Amino acid sequence: MERPYVIVSAAMSLDGFLDDTAPERLVLSNAADFDRVDEVRAGVDAIAVGAGTVRADDPRLLVRSAERRERRVAEGRSPQPLRAVFSPSGELDPGARLFNTREAGPVVVYTSEEGREACAVGAAGVEVVAAGEGEVDLEAALADLASRGVGRLLVEGGGVVHTAFLSADLVDEAHVALAPFLLGERGGARFVYEAAFPQSPGRPLRLVEARAIGEIALLTYLR
């Protein structure tokens, strides 16, 4: 199957949580690491998240740096990467910022056959694609992204999507930013959930970078 090169990216606590249970979003990173992520975004053709991340964080999934956007244009690319959402149910808030930043370019929602009927997102520039019956078939979604010219895909969460990509052995590179604390019983969403992962002790990922970004530890792995 022809598919994009897939990068999974996450910031988490030392005990593997992406957030806590408080109503406000927990900041797990710092300004320098946010800038690093912006550089990674500028280097990919598409950025993807799951429906849970849209609901919890209301992201825009944009390259923030004007200089980086200009560099993309100089390279013959669009100022912003394509944005994608994985939502088996299709239940997404049409008022989410992701669907109301038309100047940033198109958004593709990958859902199931049933989810396509339920999806109420009708904003201009948003395309709803059924890629599976009850669930989203990730291989079908990746093949569709490849047909749109996506060579590099950045997957930014959340844990359900990370688990799906990793357990399906569809991840080529992983960026893990570790915050210097544990959440324990305050922990909410996790980086991954229980699954059969091929990245086992018998076939581990390969560590290619470990560096400090202030108090954040960045680990980069390849398959």
Image (spheres, rainbow, N blue to C red):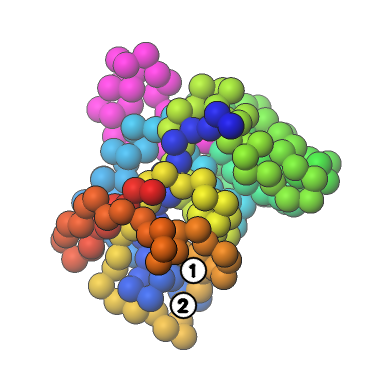
Q: Can residue 123 be seen in this view?
A: no
Q: Is mark 2 on a helix, strand or loop?
A: loop
Give yes or no for contact between labels 2 and 1 (Cβ–Cβ under 8 Å): yes
Crowding around mark 2 (Cα neighbors within 10 Å: few <14, some 14 to 19, many 20+) is some
What stretch of residues is rendered in magenta?
60-83
Instruction: Give the residue at mark 1.
Output: 190
Query: Which dot marks residue 187?
Result: 2
Identify the residue shown where x is 51% and y is 46%: 170
Q: Is residue 51 above or below residue 196?
A: above
Q: In which quarter of the image is residue 2?
A: top right
Q: Is residue 212 above or below residue 128?
A: below
Query: Is residue 78 in the magenta section?
Result: yes
Query: Which dot marks residue 150?
Result: none
Quarter of the rendering occupied by the N terminus: top right
The spot of residue 51 in percent (x, y) is 61, 52
Q: Indicate the amino acid at tag 1.
A: Arg
The spot of residue 172 in percent (x, y) is 42, 44
The spot of residue 181 in percent (x, y) is 29, 76
